[in-house]
Structures are given as structure tokens and as C-alpha cells.
Image: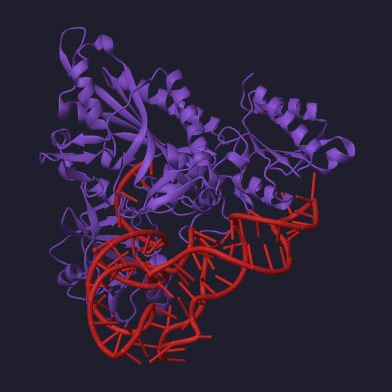
Amino acid sequence: MRLSRYFLPTLREDPAEAEVVSHKLMLRAGMIRRLASGIYSFLPLGLRALRKVEKIVREEMDRAGALEVLLPLVQPAELWRETGRWDHFGKELLRFKDRKDHDFCLGPTHEEVITDLVRREVRSYRDLPLILYQIATKFRDEIRPRFGLMRGREFIMKDAYSFDVDDQAAEKSYRLMYETYERIFNRCGLRFRAVLADTGAIGGSESHEFMVLAETGEDVIASCPKCGYAANLEMAEAVSREAEEDEAEKPLERKATPGVKSVEDVAAFLGVPARKLVKTLIYLVDGRPVAILIRGDHELNEVKLRRALGAEQVEMADAETVERLTQAPVGFAGPVGLSGVRVIADQAVRGLKNFVTGANEADAHYVNVNHPRDFEIEAFYDLRNVTEGDLCPRCGTPLELTRGIEVGHVFKLGTKYSEAMGATFLDEKGRERPMVMGCYGIGVSRTVAAAIEQNHDEHGIIWPLSLAPFQVILLTLGTDEDLMQVSENLYRALEAEGLEVLWDERPERPGVKFKDADLIGIPYKLVVGKRFKKEGQVEVKERRSGETRTFSPEEAVNFLKDEVKSALGQG
RNA sequence: CGGGGAGUGGCGCAGCAUGGUCAGCGCACCUGCCUUGGGAGCAGGGGGUCGGCGGUUCAAAUCCGCCCUCCCCGACCA
């Protein structure tokens, strides 16, 4: 591609609308433009990168025996009512009516559609297992879209669904997809990790997320450097050994703490460490208030709370509810004397001695509180976030916390959808049974953004070769005849070798060309300039390392061909 | 939705508390000259309903009201 004929509107400055590096760079590199909040157009360069991810995904899904389909974006409400999700999915399901006043939605995911398709067409165990997938646009009316392609409302996703005869067979499909995902992200050249995850709105019994490791990731991953245990912070098991404090229980005492509310302030005011405080959080669990006790230096994990109580929804209680329950302003809640509400506690609270709690009274705390002497706890659960230094639940090694971007998610769905929608088959004995399902997503457009988050420097993007929109950028520094001639020959020779080349033959000064080339992150620069005029040599400069090699034009073509082909692992 | 911030040529911004040559700067764009190994220089030039509607006033980018859009922090997720 000749750059002078290409549509590549690069920006010298960071657009004000972008915050994170991938968003800034995609705008600056002329890959995307925003149409509305969370909705982006792909420009030619951005589309090429997107297609690279799609191609890898498609090849690996096909290799795994999955079959590609294309399902509608617009879906009738009836299907969603069958599974109950029409009412449960929330506002991110964008609903609308057609001219005949029928309810429709834009598909945020396709379990209903695919299950409908399969239940109509598949009758026999002989047709299973079946894995279908598509690469298509999804729409989720996110509460707050942000970070460009990282959290858009409209985005490209690969979603796959497996149908099996029983749990054992479904397990095989799940493993197959898991391994396929590992292959996909390896081929994308990304550093990633698969972690245990919460199943959220999709449901199901077990799931893993594939996280691209990046400092700017929205998720926190707890992983064990020794045994390989890795989980999303939402799911990471906190090992809380019972506090073995042998101090004697001291008498309960009320202390005035005027205006002192936060854990840090209370700890400082009373001169005790935060771990000797117990905070009392009032939550609404499916609408009913629950008091939750958490050690002062720990954080409540809402996903764990929801799972522990088998609830659909948990949220912090509003100030009014807190005040009504505790008879005190927010910040002074405590379990002692608290009535009319369930009281549960995190494991780490068990066995604590002589701790501090709110006194359910403005400007006062209790010290030397002891359980069960001073109050009752209905039950203990693991309710807190793992923190740096917590031990691995499997092997006891200290866990490490890192950040990641979720680019893939695999779920075991069981029979949730097949039973709700009557997707059944006849087994070899003629019995009707529900299919056991799994579903598997990859955020294709998000993967492009994640790749940039993980691969950039102060000059711009540094594409992994497998995702690069072009493999080589040919820079002609100068406009004289012989430079143009040798450049054109190089351009043709490289294309003839099957390489993807962007030829910058614009009448721009060298600095401009180098800056643009760095910005758009093409892995190899092939420079034809002064050195060619003097010595007949051209240069190949690697974007990532900055390493430069000098060749004759013919050698340069061979070198690039070999580099690219061997890096992509193909002949 | 709650909290914070912002809308001024394509991009980045100044100007608004003290209404009146304030429609301006840098980059980008067009023409010419010149220059050509890391976003050159000179000269000339095109382009803006100052987010929208309404109001106050002799006069509004500037003051008032309503609305729209975008960004950031929380609940959602590929």
C-alpha cells in the first residue's frame, strides 16, 4: 500500500477525549474515530489490526472443529422472556419496538438465539457434540462506556457455544476451548493468564477468564508463583486463619470519638492498628439489610457476598437505611446492641480479641469488644478481598497481585439455557435429555486495545508481528529518481514475497516519516535514503528493539521475508 | 443514576469573574520559495452559527434559565 493513497489521519497531539494509552494511540494512529459515547468507527489501519485478531481466532476455532455461523444482532423479546433474562438483564440490554409494536433488543450475547437454533435442528445424540461460533457485533448499553475500545457499547466479539450429551462430554468441550484460547492468545503475541472467574449475568457453574497482563487493566488477578493457582480478585479465596490471640478479654468500654469515622481516623485516634478494628457495613441483599463485619484492614468483596448468601443483587445500603437500623449517623455502626438485622462476618474476624467497633451512636466507638461475649454472629464466610501477602489457598505460598484486561471468558453453562428453552435430544436409549452447554467469548476489538496497552512506548504502538496491520513500512527519505526507483523495486519484491508493506513515498521530511512509522507501530522499518546514495545500502530497523541492520536491497528482502515467516511460524 | 470536569475552525488550547476592534494562538490544511536521516524555515491564504434554544442588554463567546453532548470517579462486563 502506498501511503500517499492511504487513509491514515495521524494526530500529533493526544485528543482530549482519551485517557488510557491504547485509546490515545488508536486515535492518534488513525485507527479509530468516535461516533458516539462507546461507539467507534474503524479506519483502514484499525480494521487491518482487527482483522488480524479475527483471522487468528477463526483459524484456531476452525482447527478445534467449531463451526462458524452468523446470528442476528436484533433479537425478539420472546426468546429472552423464555429464559427470564428479558426482566433480569437490566438496562444494558437495549430494548426497542418495531413498527408493529413488538419488543426487540440488540443482542448483548447470543445464548438465546443459538439455543433456539439448536433446539429446532438437533434431535439426536448422534449430532453431538456441536460447537458453533460467530464473530460479530454486540451491543451492550453500558452504564459507563470508557477507555475507547476497552469498554465500548458496540464491540466485536467472538462467541462460541458448545452442546454436549452430558457433563463429562461438556467438560471435554470446555477443555478444548480453554486450550484453543491459549493458542489464540499465544499467537496474538500477548502475555496473558487464565484465571478462575465469577460467572456473573451469563450464569453457569464454572468459568475462567483470560487476562492480558497490563498495569492499566481494570481487573486484579491473584496468582500463586509456585503452584499456578490464579483467580480474579473477585474469586480469589482468602485464607483467613483464626486469629490466635491469647490476650485476655478486657471489659467493654465506650469511648468518645467526635467526628472520627473512617478506619484510618479511628485507628489513629485510638492509637490501635487497623487490624484491631472491625467495620460494620450495612448492605441491601436482594433488598433486605444485612450487617457485615470486616476487619479494619480488609476490604469487602461484593461478589463473594452475593455468592455466600445466594443472592441476586447486593448493594451498599443508603444512608437513610443505615441510620434507621443503627440509630446513628453513617460511620458509627457496630454489632453490639444491633437488632433487627442479620449479622454475618468475614472469616478473619473470628477469634479477634478486644477489638474496636462503632457504638451505634454518633461520635462514639466501643473498645475491647469480644465475640461472642458482646454480640452474636449468624455465620462466618470468606467475604474479603485477598491482599498482597495473603497465602495461596492451595499451597500456602504468598500470592502475587497483578492487573489484567479481560479478553476472553469461558463458561460451563450446564443445562441452564437448554432446560429453560427445551433444547433436548434423544440419547441412545431413546430418553429425552437436555443438552449440556458451554459458552466462550473473546472480545475481539478489546483484544486489539489490550495488545496496545501491553505493547507501546513513548513513541507509539509496538505491534506484535501477528497483529500488525502491516509487517513492514518502507520509508523513502527523499524524492530523487534513483531512491524512488529502488524503493519501488523493494516494494514490489516484498509484496511478491507475500509481505504486507506500507510504502511511505510521501514528499515529507524524514522526521515526519519516522514519527508516523513509530506511532503506528509497524514492526519493521525499511529505510532507503542517504546511505543508499552513498553506499548502495538500505537499513532495516526493528520497532521494538530499535536494532538496525544494513543490507543491500536484495539482502533486505530476504532478511525480512525470513524474519516474518519464522516469527509467524509458517513456511 | 449519583459525584466531578468540559464543550470556542480538523486537533490541542487562550479569551469568559471586570459584557463593547476577542473571534485569537500553536499544530494541521492550501499556494509559492526553500529544505530533506527523527514532527524544518519564510511569505501568502482558506476555514469558526464560540454545543443548542430562549432570556437580560443599545450591545453576549462573556450574564441568567432550560436542554444536548463528551470526559473522569463508583455499580456492569468481552
Viewer-nearest residue: A70 or A112: A70
- Kindly tell me whether residue A486 is visible in this rendering: yes
- Kindly tell me whether residue A195 is visible in this rendering: no
Q: Quadrant of residue A317?
A: bottom left
Residue at the location (21% across, 16% down)?
A121
Q: Is residue A176 above or below residue A283?
A: above
The image shows residue A560 at horizontal and vertical percentages of: 71, 29
Q: Is residue A513 left or right of residue A251?
A: right
Q: Is residue A380 above or below residue A190?
A: below
Q: Residue furthest top?
A: A429
Q: Residue furthest right?
A: A534
Q: Is residue B9 left or right of residue A90?
A: right
Image hue for chain B: red
Q: Is residue B59 left or right of residue A15?
A: left
Q: Which chain is purple?
A: A
* Image quadrant occupied by the N terminus of chain A: top right
Q: Quadrant of residue A123?
A: top left
The image shows residue B71 at horizontal and vertical percentages of: 41, 60
The image shows residue A60 at horizontal and vertical percentages of: 47, 23
